[in-house]
Amino acid sequence: MPLVTTKEMFKKAYTGGYAVGAFNVNDMEILQGIVEAAKEEKAPLILQVSAGARKYARHEYLIHLVKAALETADLPIALHLDHGEDFEVCKACIDGGFSSVMIDGSKYPLEENIKLTKKVVDYAHPKGVTVEAELGKLAGIEDAVKVAAKDATYTDPDEAEKFVKETGCDSLAIAIGTSHGAYKFKGDANLDIARLNEIARRLPNFPLVLHGASSVPQYLVDECNKYGGKLPGAKGVPEEMLREAAKGAICKINIDTDLRLAMTATIRRIFVESPAEFDPRKYLGPARDEIKKVVKHKIADVLGCSGKA
Ligand code: PH4
Ligand code: ZN
């Protein structure tokens, strides 16, 4: 099946009350783990590639790895640029075979973000590529507990309405308290669900996106630390919160950190248990299997998109 855009995927996810998983791809083993999981679950899939991934693995390699995945999987798969920081990188991905791009203008003032996003939309849409934008800044661990910081950084519902109308973007990443990485909250997870509901009310039938949505399961942190890791008190978004969000307007949930943890925990264990091991297949293969397990769990037990391909 050829690549698809996120348009149809999100329409179905919105009406079906589930979310599509967007998993970050950095190398072949990660890609294979993700795709095998989606195949077994018959789930639609967003494979996303950051600037860091493009730098690490190179655009051409990633494109051809994804093409190989398409040949082996009869699933709707979108290839998406994650956090495109300027027009040029979005253009390179649109021209270079991606079916969806994110332009992340969240660091700019509203009008500048609108202008940049619209420029990308105007270039992407005639080429049949969908565009995700971002409004509001993802929280740092400090922001998550400071009420005063919320209004300055979280997505403003009035601005969201104006932004979507004026840019014509296809989906919007919002800031409601999540953040990237393994250290999202100091205490209990604290998401501004009221804000999410208000944005959803203002933008009927419009797909919203949650970045920084890894749950950072304790067993993976423990596994890393048991085998020599030193991850201090990591904390993610509870899966119950993601389940609820997926039932509503959140149609895309980004997960990267949980895959990194699964991969790292496995490789650490193997190096400790078998210190003489030096065949990369003997540790990258099991790491791929663990990634597959995590992705299957997310698809089946959290996002609700099993059988929706
Ligand atoms: N992302 C992933 C960002 C990865 O530069 P990079 O490759 O390190 O960027 O966009 C997420 O939203 C992932 O959220 P998570 O950290 O909670 O998994
Ligand atoms: Zn992100």
Image (cartoon, helix red, strand yellow):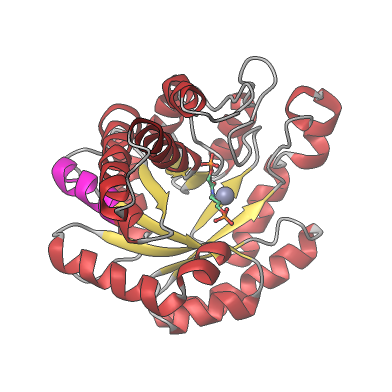
Residue at point 40%, 49% (across, down): 23
> Is the magenta region chiefly helix, strand or loop?
helix
Figure check: 188 above or below 82: above
Q: Please state the horizontal and vertical placement of residue 127, each as a whole percent of the image.
A: 41, 82
Per the rendered image, the range of residues in magenta is 32-42
* Near-viewer residue (182 or 46): 182
Residue at point 50%, 41% (across, down): 257
Q: Please state the horizontal and vertical placement of residue 4, each as a whole percent of the image.
A: 29, 66
Residue at point 42%, 21% (across, down): 219
Residue 278 in sight here: yes
Q: Quadrant of residue 186?
A: top right
Q: Which residue is outermost to the top?
A: 188
35 inside magenta stretch:
yes
Q: Quadrant of residue 114?
A: bottom right
Figure check: 240 above or below 161: above
Figure check: 290 above or below 168: above
Q: In the drawing, does residue 300 fall left or right of residue 72?
A: right
Q: Please state the horizontal and vertical placement of residue 254, each as a whole percent of the image.
A: 47, 45
Q: Quadrant of residue 301?
A: top left
- The quadrant the N terminus occupies is bottom left
Q: Which residue is outermost to the right?
A: 148
Q: Please state the horizontal and vertical placement of residue 46, each as a whole percent of the image.
A: 36, 55
